[in-house]
Image: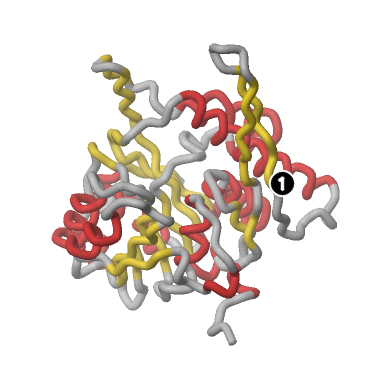
Amino acid sequence: MMSVASDWSHGRIESIKGESTLAVVIPARDEEGTIGQVVSAIAAELGEIVDELVVMDSLSSDRTAAVASNAGARVHSVADVRPDLGVHPGKGEALWKSQFVTSADVVAFIDADLTEWGTHFVLGVVGPLLADPQVVLCRGFYDRVLDIDGDVTLEGGRVTELVARPWLTLFRPELGAIVQPLAGEWAIRRNVFQQLHVPIGYGVEFSTLLDVYDEWGIDSIAQVDLGRRAHRHQNIHDLSVMAVEILATAERRRARTAEPAATDSFSADVQLARLSEHRQWSHRAVPVTERLPASTLIGPAD
């Protein structure tokens, strides 16, 4: 199922929401410069639709939490949510832990570093789930604005085009029509997300897509054209780390298909080597740990 954001107007979402509840979760780490406008826009424009507006603060060292709270969000530090389960830095960890502090039927995830966007991002990704009970996951896609030293292009999403989509072409060609499999704006039914293993880092979007496809099939996945999106971009060395996380996530699922016994969560780091301009080697740990499905852990800790 493919649609465009204009299909999901504020009025239409109000009319089809019914008794369903909606949470918007924003994972954030050191995003005090942008988090305020993201939260305040959602609170002001979608307040009567969004039942829970939550920022998951991923061990920030700046004023992200305070800015988000002042803008109207309920803020949780990942360190304070189920501390009995430990804590990791990483986007996936923040999304995984949000399951313990939200209760809505549908959960939409929105990135914290957006600079060119609109609240139609939220309406667009939740619309297909509210309209069609067969849809369990909706992914956004958009023209991704890339600004390199003032040279603005629409060639953002480098890991998407160089890693994720080529992997899908080779190993999950049925998902080849998913425009941006790593997009940070997406929505999912709570009862589905709670059944999934969740990588603690950037692999969370890819793992969710693959796992939903494998378990519920292609007809359970929708995507919506959200227009244009701009955000803060990472340097090429950080993107290498992201690429390793994506490949680890994907390869683990390919192995699981071949050998169903290989389904347990695991905790590990791999080392990414880099040769500097001074011809010195450095090694950066890349976490590829995955969390157990939240459904196995939901409930108060002793």
Residue visible at 65% across and 36% down in the picture: 247
160 lies above or below 290: above
Q: Residue 53: x and y, percent?
A: 29, 66
**Which secondary structure lies at badge 1?**
helix
Q: Is 222 left or right of 219, judged from the image as shown?
A: left
In the image, 275 versus 58, the foreground residue is 275
Q: Which residue in the rendered view is the most extreme toward the bottom?
A: 302
Q: Is residue 128 at least partly visible in the picture? A: no
Q: Is 59 left or right of 44, judged from the image as shown?
A: right
Image quarter of residue 6: top left
Q: Residue 225: x and y, percent?
A: 35, 39
In the image, 280 versus 101, the foreground residue is 280
Give the residue number, with chain letter if any, for mark 1.
Answer: 253
Q: Residue 14: x and y, percent?
A: 23, 66
Q: Is residue 144 at least partly visible in the picture? A: yes
Q: Residue 40: x and y, percent?
A: 17, 57
Total of numbered circles in the picture? Answer: 1
User: What kind of residue is marked 1?
Assistant: Arg
Q: Is 37 left or right of 89, judged from the image as shown?
A: left
- Protein image colouring: secondary structure
In the image, 182 versus 125, the foreground residue is 182
Image quarter of residue 187: bottom left
Q: Which residue in the rendered view is the most extreme toward the left?
A: 44
Residue visible at 22% across and 57% down in the picture: 67
Image quarter of residue 11: bottom left
19 lies above or below 150: below
